[in-house]
Amino acid sequence: MQAVTLEFLGTGTSQGVPVIGCACAVCRSSDPRDQRLRTSALIRVGGKQLLIDAGPDLRQQLLRARIDHLDAVLLTHEHMDHISGIDDLRALNFRMKRAMDLHSSPATLDAVARMYHYAFTKERYPGVPELNLVPIAGRSFIADGVVLEVIHVMHHRMPVLGFRIGGLAYITDAKTMEDDEISRLNGIHTLVLNALRIEDHPSHLNLREALQLAERIGPARVLFTHISHLLGRHADVSRRLPENVALAYDGLHVDVEA
């Protein structure tokens, strides 16, 4: 298996951190690790760059990470904090001179087609994004030559896709996982998992639930993402975590063992 590198482009929940109008300790923190754009990540493997999710901060994220090309985009689900930045992919259409492949469930791609209807009309306005909608069917799929496995989780009543490539599994916006999906994570080295806040939430894992699920899966390293200001300051929470568990932060790069 080829080496895999993951870059966290954003690690915040749907409101980001700081939250508009909030004066809590997290939102007022001067620690850059407490400044979180909406959740997104970049996988680099075998010379390919795969984007996971394209939320409202995508333009800022791609500029900050100096991304000048993407080989494919993987969408976990259709909520706005994960797909509302897709129009900004047109800059890469222009640069790469080709359409961008979007891989996701049929339901999520239907939502993309509705939201970005102007990109799929017969007579399109010049300059609209060029998008190829590629449905994911089955347990695995290929994105521009890269083979990935699909992990199915539930976000309250909404199905969400997680992705596994080699020793890396990336799961966000999960609340529950069936036993057979958990078993498909056997042997992973690095688990990325959402951990929204301390208190319970109807559609997201809280910190206690995320720790319990991570312990059950048993990877060597765990990184939490999709974090809200209600979890607490990065430095404070980090001191209470097990040795192999950490909070991810925007701009973090990790190399993953196969």
Image (cartoon, rainbow, N blue to C red):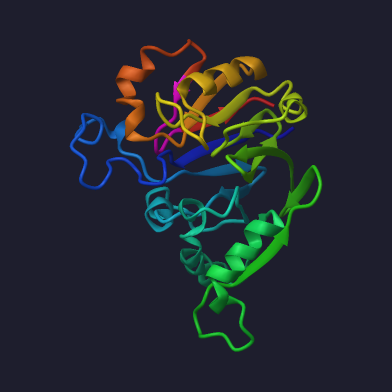
Quarter of image, res 1? top right
Q: Nearer the viewer, residue 228 or 70?
A: 228
Q: Residue at x 47, y 60 (%)?
A: 84
171 lies above or below 207: below
Main secondary structure of the magenta stretch: loop
Q: Quadrant of residue 160?
A: top right
Q: Is residue 101 visible?
A: no
Q: Which residues are magenta?
A: 246-252
Residue in the picture at 57% in, 35% down: 174
Instruction: Say above or below: 150 vs 122.
Output: above
The picture places residue 88, in percent across and down from the top left corner, at: 46, 65
Q: Quadrant of residue 10?
A: top left
- Comparing 227 with 33, the one in front is 227
Question: At x 53% / y 23%, what residue is drawn?
Answer: 210
Quadrant in which the C terminus is drawn: top right
On the picture, is 171 further left or further right than 258? left
